[in-house]
Amino acid sequence: MSTKKSLVVIGNGMVGQHFLASLVASQCKDSYHITTFCEEPRAAYDRVHLSSFFSGKTAADLALADEDFFANNDITLHLGDKAANIDRNNKTVTSAKGLTIAYDTLVLATGSYPFVPPVPGHDRPNCLVYRTIEDLEAMASAAKTSKVGVVVGGGLLGLEAAKALTDLGLETHVVEFAPRLMAVQLDEGGGAMLRRKVEALGLQVHTGKNTTLITDGEQCVNKMCFADGEELETDIVLFSAGIRPRDDIARSCGLDVGPRGGIVIDNQCKTSDPAIYAIGECALWNGMIYGLVAPGYSMARTVVADLAGEEGSFTGADMSTKLKLMGVDVASIGDAHAKSQGALVYTYQNGASEVYKRLVVSQDKKQLLGAVLVGEVSGYGTLLQYCLNGIELPENPDSLILPPRGDESVGLGPDALPMSAQICSCYDVSKGAICQAIEAGAITLGALKAQTKAATGCGGCGALLKSVMDCELTKHGIAVSTDLCEHFPYTRQDLYNLVVVEQIKTFNDLLETHGKGSGCDICKPAIGSILASYWNEYVLAKEHLGLQDTNDTFLANMQKDGTYSVVPRITGGEISPDMLIALGQVGKKYQLYTKITGGQRVDLFGARVDQLPHIWKELIDAGFESGHAYGKSLRTVKSCVGSSWCRYGVDDSVGLAIELENRYKGLRSPHKLKFAVSGCTRECAEAQSKDVGVIATENGWNLYVCGNGGMKPRHADLFATGLDKETLIKYIDRFLIFYVRTAARLQRTSVWMENMEGGLDYLKSVVIDDKLGLCGQLEQQMTYVIDTYQCEWKTTIEDENKLKRFRHFINSDQPDDNVVFVEERGQIRPADEEERKHFKIMEVA
Amino acid sequence: MMPWKDVCSSDDLQPDSGVCALVAGQQVAVFYRVKEQAVYAIHNYDPIGKANVLSRGMIGDVKGEPVVASPLYKQHFSLKTGVCIEDEQISVPVYPVRLHNGRVEIQVALSNNGEMKTSIHEEASV
Ligand SMILES: Cc1cc2nc3c(=O)[nH]c(=O)nc-3n(C[C@H](O)[C@H](O)[C@H](O)COP(=O)(O)OP(=O)(O)OC[C@H]3O[C@@H](n4cnc5c(N)ncnc54)[C@H](O)[C@@H]3O)c2cc1C
Ligand code: SF4
Ligand code: FES
């Protein structure tokens, strides 16, 4: 039955995988049987973020495709099997393990390998490279017995590797043959500024050094000898001296390769054999090897278009880059070295703030040809767009790199960009595509990212994406009103700040000074929550009562028939038999429907408003307290049984869960908060689906944030690893108060983080590195909230006056006659309309 | 003219919030807006959520119109006319109400919307 053709892909790296994903998303997906050879022991992973392996990401976190991708799309994946030979006459591929597969179409995506200069001694112990997960594992294990590390090569990758060595706790050196760092991207001035900055961070830089020999060291494992006679002792030598295309398999079957390597391809990415394509870092187009992922992706899409019979060609790619190296922002655009004919150069250097910027413009000063930015790269997006789209420069091009004078704006408004302008190069998203997505209703940063994938690769285009979005929304008159509601022309965050700065304690004071009208069911609970988070006063106090949502006003959750459910706190889900019996007795006495919740506690349903204080009195006497199930506040900290009982448990998850729940109970927040703690990485408590998740590991607690279940489930992000309890709690304190301060009304942590410019990294910089200098305040605020905690139910039943409200009628003791229950599975439930009619007839009769 | 029925003391009202009173067999939601010194009375039955809960809703204004938001599904009902802001086809009965000598007084007629159950309560509440 097979009318399908056979398509074989050699190499399942980043580009090979992007090709597969694009192919199965295209219309010709059913025309091929797809087979792919993957030399590495695991399917494609995100090499670009390889270094995050050291900050706790696992191989699984880095995987590019989900587990079922291959099975679901009928792709045969040969893991750990290398394609060894291509027989072009018979059109077959033979693998190292001896498989032979026939192909109609063959795609080479073999990538590149790190170049190791043939210095004598380059293969000595601890001489390593930086390209695969195995390389990193080797590095981590070598680092355990090492003190000093040297990176050979001061380019992009070399500096990234140096950062990794520093993070592993080694004294780190960078040895560069060229006279400056990042010689390919930066000019002399930029290189010098970068050097000063990384040296200030403790890295030792040696430029103009030619390594001639690696031999036995005296204090260290190795000794490097340089042409100028100097020596350097080191335990680890990490080569990062450039990449070379993996073209041997192409070479041996006679495909054209370039004089310095690389499989020659045309604009359709076809090699010299029309049945064979080559894409990614193994391909040589127009004499160029592209060592970045975006051009490779673009080649992959070109091949898919060609297979589908559509127009499409690869015509080169922009090599501009922006990145953070050892905490230093660096960007390079286009012709950074001013090699173009007649190019003019503007340079701005600020030694005090360590900023270096350089513009390369055409002779007539109309076009931007290139740029270098070190230390301050906020202009990158604008400059890149000038360069890529040939937009005419302003009269004084230097205004683009000089600090703004007065209030003149130097940025290029997103309006000036043509629809074809590429905003995200990783996923090739144009301004046009973004505008379309906005028209179709994606009007938040999170939605736009999900819809277009823009800013989900390297993330470099995030700021630009946001400004395009803002500009489009304003234009559409979707007037991005961030006003809370018609009564307050402020965002929730603004109002929070007003409360703090002006020390406002009541809704009416805030309304009088900053609002109009008398408020509504949007601003009242929002401000009620702000006041409660900040001042933590009793929510049913006279001046706050009217602000509380129904559930808060009666400290219980209203159900469909107007009755309430009662949820006492059961910290960490741990409860003694006696307490369980007490709970059961209350449920039985008041004939409540009882159910176990997902948060590991017990929910008692069907309590009439007049019964609530009686029920709570009994619960409190039995030792329970409010579970705050009614509030936008911490709900539960779910836990697995952990090391006390579980055979696999690494740490006491129940103990920690109880401690966290007691610490944060009662904290009012923009939305409800759920936590969980697992005792080991088997993750029985499902911590990764919570706002705050904690997992015990051999090295300490791992902290996850911003996950949620519900309508749009989201996996939490790994925030920090190997923490001791004190640091863990400090981070959670800061995280929570920062969320409480800055989130929008009813915004869960996930959406809050996704809409934050800079996302997870920014959040980390605030919470871990204290980038905003706020951490002291955040912790102090949390301490205040904890110190002023009260069980609201206890306060309420002790106050005669408050209890007056817990009656159905203010002037009668009758209960609500519309509340009718029927029995189901041995418990009560609200009667439906039909049943209720029947009931009334019986009553009258 | 219908007589004013005494319901409760004005101290029983909740500032910027509501209570429910039983008047002539009807469940009446009574709201008190402090700034305006105004009281409003509408039927307590939420015709959309189908439960006696409006007195437990949050009050405020929508474009100047005083409203209560249903605690069940959050529709707004005008405190002056009883009309639902989200769907003008739907409304709840409204009753004349006043503060008189420190007491809250309401006029309740027998309406078609409210279910008149027994007249015993009427006597009892006077
Ligand atoms: C640490 C690091 C940081 C980086 N940072 C960035 C960055 O910030 N931005 C950026 O744009 N780029 C970055 N890059 C470069 C980027 O990772 C590469 O451009 C990209 O991975 C190229 O994809 P590829 O598929 O061509 O090659 P690869 O991802 O290397 O995939 C090739 C795969 O083919 C396999 N293979 C080779 N030969 C065979 C065979 N005969 N049979 C079977 N399998 C075979 C290889 O084992 C490999 O798995 C970085 C690279 C590294 C190492
Ligand atoms: S997460 Fe680990 S410790 Fe907790 S129950 Fe599961 S296996 Fe045991
Ligand atoms: S440019 Fe890399 S994510 Fe958009």
Image: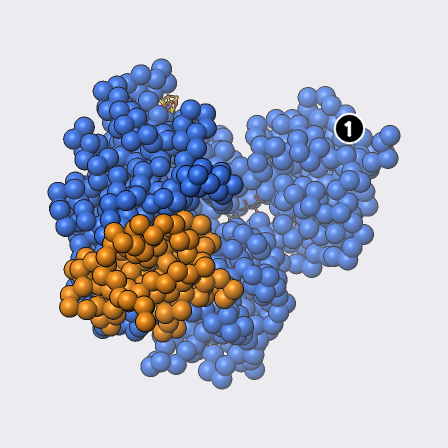
Chain colours: A blue, B orange
Task: State the image quarter where residue A430 is shown.
Answer: bottom right
Horizontal and vertical percent position of residue A608: 31, 41
Ligand 1: give its quadrant: top right
Label 1 residue SS: strand
Task: State the image quarter where residue A563 is shown.
Answer: top left
Judge by depth and name the residue closer to the eye, A28 or A402.
A28
Horizontal and vertical percent position of residue A281: 62, 46
Please name the amino acid that badge 1 sits on.
Ile
Judge by depth and name the residue closer to the eye, A790 or A252.
A790
- Quadrant that contains the N terminus of chain B: bottom left
Q: Which residue shows up at 27% across the image and 27% down it? A: A589
Q: Is residue A156 something that shows in the picture?
A: yes
**Which residue carries the number 1 mark?**
A101
User: In the displayed image of the protein, which residue is found farthest to the bottom?
Assistant: A395
Q: Is residue A201 something that shows in the picture?
A: no
Task: State the image quarter where residue B33 is shown.
Answer: bottom left
Relative to B53, A508 lies left or right:
left
Horizontal and vertical percent position of residue A625: 21, 35
Horizontal and vertical percent position of residue A539: 21, 52
Mark 1 surroundings: few (<14), some (14-19) or many (≥20) residues within 10 A:
some
Q: Which residue shows up at 81% across the image and 52% down it? A: A309
Vertical relation: A78 (above or below) A766? above
Q: Which residue shows up at 39% across the image and 50% down it? A: B117
Judge by depth and name the residue closer to the eye, A47 or A165.
A47
